[in-house]
Amino acid sequence: MRLKKLEILGFKSFAHKTALEFPVNISAIVGPNGSGKSNVVDSVRWVLGEQSFKNLRSKSGVDLIWAGSAVKSAQGKASVSLYFDNHDGFFPIDFEEVIIGRKVYRDGANEYYLNNSQVRLKDITELLARSKLGLRGHSIVNQGSTDEILKANSLERRGILEEALGLREFQLKKSETETKLLETGANLEQTASLINEIFPHLRSLKRQVEKFKKREFLINDLNNLENEFFEIKIQEILAERSENQKAREEANVKITAEKENFEAKQKLFEGQMAKISQTGEKSGQLEIDLEKLNAEWRDITRELGRVEGIIESAKRHNVKNVKTLETVLAIKIKYWAKRLKITSGLADINAVKEAIKSLAGEIETISNYFERNEISKILSLVDLADLEEEIASPYEKDKEDLKIKLTKLEDQIKQVKETVLKIRLEETKWRDKYLGFQKELEVARREYISVQEATQKFDLEEEKIKLREADIKSEMWSSGKNYEEFYKTFPIFAIANNDNERTLAVAEFAELENKIIKLRREIADIGSIDEETMREYEETNKRHEFLTTEFADLNRAIESLKNLIGDLADRINNDFKMGLTKINEEFNHYFKLMFGGGSASLKLSEETSFEKAGLPAEALAEAGVSINVNMPQKRVKDLSLLSGGERSLVSIALLFAIVSASRPPFLILDEIDAALDEDNAARFAKVLKDLAEKTQFILITHNRATMEIANVLYGVTMGDDGVSKLFSLKLEDAPS
């Protein structure tokens, strides 16, 4: 690593932008007193993070800004940038060039930059600490502070040495860790206080929530029992419906069979009825025919009797009993018919006419006799023999006709009676069958009606099932369950048909129902869940868990921090002891070189007593550093008894020892050679030249011997305007 360049703008007396480049190992800045040489050192100290205005020889941040002059107006800000070559990776960042910058404004605001990106002061401090660059070490030695390490107390001296040895990084980490430990401890106490504060309330909330959780547990149990309960209920409904449906189907089959049987019997009955009707009709017709025949037989019998009576009466009484006009007229007409028959053969029409006239006259006469009931006169006009013949003859013939007719009628009546009897016997047979069929038909009708009525029972049973199903739906709805969804979700199993199993199922079901009632009562006693309480518990519990976790984390963090502090203390102590050993060797070497003899050493204060006491490394790390010197040819060991020149040489010897033991990348020395005489100045210059092989030096000096070893000289002057100006000279280019 090499310091390449320093840029200053508006810082103290450097009103104009000024750049100092450092291409060689030794650069010297020279100039008269008051020209602003030390302002260059102050600018470097400031950009590296110096916060003490005293160390910057100022009273405030405004004093660092160019205040203006008669010819040059004041600046609003001051800025300084340091450019480093980082090809070797000295700075632990991935840049080949590292630029550290700082700005201050008149309002007191400060800005820090790393490669032109604004960062925190902490970032700059940590970077420098990791790179063994610091403000308290030996990177910058101000004018008049050469023997500062001698004036410092043992603990301050130790701090200077630690920074010089590159332990500042670990000290910062240790300090930060200690601060963090204190903060963590405070956080732990605060967390414990918060835990103690919320725990009683959390415990109360927990009791309530546990009741709610118990309620949820009970609800879950209730839900399972209700599922089982409703499943059984639904199973029963389905079983009943299935049985009813099965019975209905069986009944329907029976109805169909009974219907078919009834219809068949009815058809058969109707056939019987038709036959009976036909037989009845046939029988009726024969009865009618028989009645007609009987009536005709009776008429013929009566007529035959009458004729026979007439014949018998005529024979008994002759014509005495013939009293009718018709009889007489019939005789006379018959008589005259004979005469007219005879007469008709005559050609004389007149004779015929006379005969007819005579007949008409007789008929009139007979009629008159009849009207007067003069029977004797009528008889006188009739031949008795003819009269008897005429009276009996037609009746005999009629009698014979009637007897023939009567005989035929009797045969017919006999046949009809036989047919009627036969038909009546057949009708009786059919009627007997009819009565049997009627009884069978009635039985079939009753069975058919009975089966039909049974279907109404099934309908009624289905309605009852529907009512129970509606009750279950309502009960399920009250329990927050949907019948249809439940029906789809749960498998339905057949209910046991065995009576014993049914009895057991009923007993178990009753127990199940009692459990449900008990759970519902317990849930009702607990009441509804207070969502606000649940929410408050969750929030409080989360808060408690967070705090508990944080408490545990803080405890672990405290342990970790304590361990880290111990590790850092061990590291610092071990590295410091090792470094101190090296510095001691070099210190003794350069002391002898500067004084021409004698000896010098650094020692941890109370080191022996610490170790004997077995104190931890933290205690040893707090031990200060004392300086012991043995002057050649003098018995002076106390630093306070040394002269100014001797103190300066001791300081320089210690500085060279530190540089040798822990090489800084660069070192700025501000007139630390001012008190040296010519011989000591020569020795000083020679040591610097040797050390410059590994360390870059920037020297502020008036000493000629020091100037002679420089490769580049920067001259600083100040004109009447109060502005510091810079000019440079490479000595290899200067005229000899």
Image (tube, helix red, strand yellow):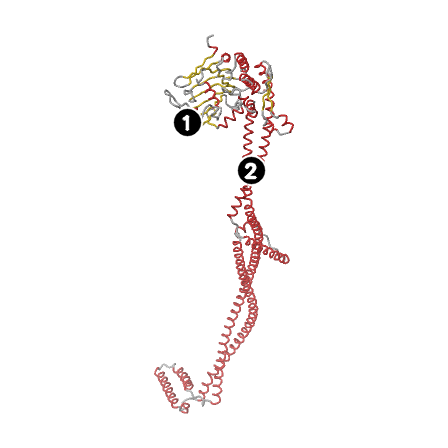
The residue labelled by disc 2 is 188
Between 146 and 238, the one nearer to me in the picture: 146
- Residue 565 position, x and y percent, is 58, 30
Marks 1 and 2, the one that precedes in the sequence: 1
Q: Along the horizontal axis of the image, is 300 left or right of 588?
A: left
Q: Callout 2: few (<14), some (14-19), or many (20+) C-alpha neighbours within 10 Å?
A: many
Between 243 and 359, the one nearer to me in the picture: 243
Q: Callout 1: few (<14), some (14-19), or many (20+) C-alpha neighbours within 10 Å?
A: some
Is residue 89 among what the camera can see? no
Relative to 158, say whether 540 is above or below. below
Q: Which label lies toward us, 1 or 2?
A: 1
Q: Residue at x 54, y 30 (%)?
A: 176
- Cα gap from disc 1 to disc 2, whole angstroms: 42 Å
Residue contact at pointers 1 and 2, CB within 8 angstroms? no
| Residue 351 image-quadrant placement | bottom left
Q: How many marks?
A: 2
Task: Check disc 2 and report its element: helix, strand or loop.
Answer: helix
- Residue 511 position, x and y percent, is 61, 56
Going by the numbered disc 1, the residue's amino acid type is Arg
Task: Check disc 1 and report its element: helix, strand or loop.
Answer: loop
| Residue 255 image-quadrant placement | bottom right
Disc marking residue 106: 1
- Residue 674 position, x and y percent, is 50, 16
- Residue 15 position, x and y percent, is 41, 21
Between 445 and 701, the one nearer to me in the picture: 701
Disc marking residue 205: none
Relative to 107, say whether 442 is above or below. below
Going by the numbered disc 2, the residue's amino acid type is Leu
Q: Along the horizontal axis of the image, is 15 left or right of 183?
A: left
Q: Along the horizontal axis of the image, is 624 left or right of 722?
A: right
Residue located farthest toward the left when viewing the structure as drawn: 350
